[in-house]
Amino acid sequence: MTRSIILAAIVSVSAFGTAFGQQATDTDPYTPYPFAQITNDIRYPAAQPPSGTVSQHGEIEYLANNVFGTHWYVEADAAVWHFVTAGDPKDEVILFVHGHPDTWWSWHEVMSYLADDFYVIAIDTLGYGQSDKRLELDLTYSGVATGVAALMTEIGVETFNLVGHDRGSVIGDHMVAQVPINPRILAYLRMQQSADKPHGLPRPNHEAMKEVAFHTQPNFMRNLLESDYFAVEMSAEHLARAIWEYGFEGTAEAAAVLFADAGFDKEQDFRLAEVFPRMTMPVVFMQGEHDPGQRPEEYWETADMVPDGKVLIVDANHFIQAEKPKLVADAARDLFD
């Protein structure tokens, strides 16, 4: 197994004060799969996993709340995608798209609350986790959005409810904007991403994030998640797992390429011109009221931008699904039922 710890940041290190002080480093050993078990229900054809990955196709893993998920590797749109599913494939689908710096793991508890009634799918987007990171792939947000839709087609999912968080909502916005994909989205829970107003201050440093070195700062992900800025309270095991999931070789290089396509002004212009006019499905804009970079007042008029929109401000910070997974699951159920 070849791995290197790749760390990411959203703003500069100096912007954070570590909530719990310096603890163990991001290179501490962590083994998430002590007893691998393969399901008898191999429902998707297996692709060759990307180099350095760990999970196996069809591998079962305990998520939370007596719910188990299954890992898969499937090729779609010339890329190999890693994703985890739970629930009955015959049920209505909820597709979870993570942000940065994150992976499918951020949704594992949310999935457990919804798997009784929905078929839940959490992907590693291209460049992250155990999905493909080859730089020759289309690692623009539009290209990744096209690939996500191709993956859904490949596994037999025609329509789906969409949940995006952070940069995952940027991918979700591109899915809304693309005419062939748009009708497939039944409803959209859009979390922690600027909407009709410019991003507040402090802003992520997108220019710095276009450099590989920015994504390899020692212990940055630990400091980020433990900082007062994001104030994520999670167990030591969950923190170690989040760091481990983000640490696969090639992530820093892929993240830098992805952020070459980022830009606050460009993205706001794109939303106003191409996303909001195509948001004909029900949409909930969910924001944590304690995120210092995205204040509630930025969203007071957002629901007026779409025919069936709602703004939901909740008692949380940026990583709502890590802080309060039941809150996210309840919001999803209210929207998708």
Image (spheres, helix red, strand yellow):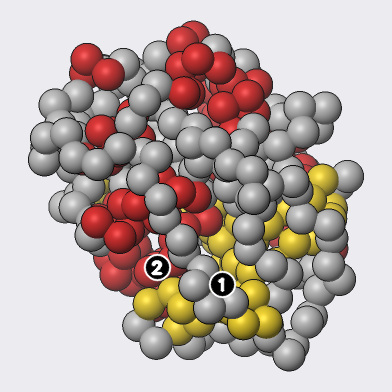
Position of 40 relative to 204 (above/below): below
For label 1, the residue is 120
Q: Residues within 10 Å of mark 2 (few under 14, many from 20)?
A: many
SS under mark 2: helix
Q: Is residue 171 visible?
A: no
Q: Which of 257/53 is in front?
A: 53
Position of 325 relative to 268 (above/below): below
Tag 2: amino acid: Val
Horizontal and vertical percent position of residue 49: 77, 55
User: In the image, which disc is placed on residue 260?
Assistant: none
For label 2, the residue is 110
Horizontal and vertical percent position of residue 113: 39, 78
Reading the chain from its start, which is encountered first: label 2 or label 1? 2
Cα–Cα gap, marks 2 and 1: 9 Å
x 40%, y 14%: residue = 205
Tag 1: amino acid: Val
Q: Is residue 310 left or right of residue 289?
A: right
SS under mark 1: strand
Q: Is residue 34 visible?
A: yes
x 48%, y 23%: residue = 215
Q: Which of 53/123 is in front?
A: 53
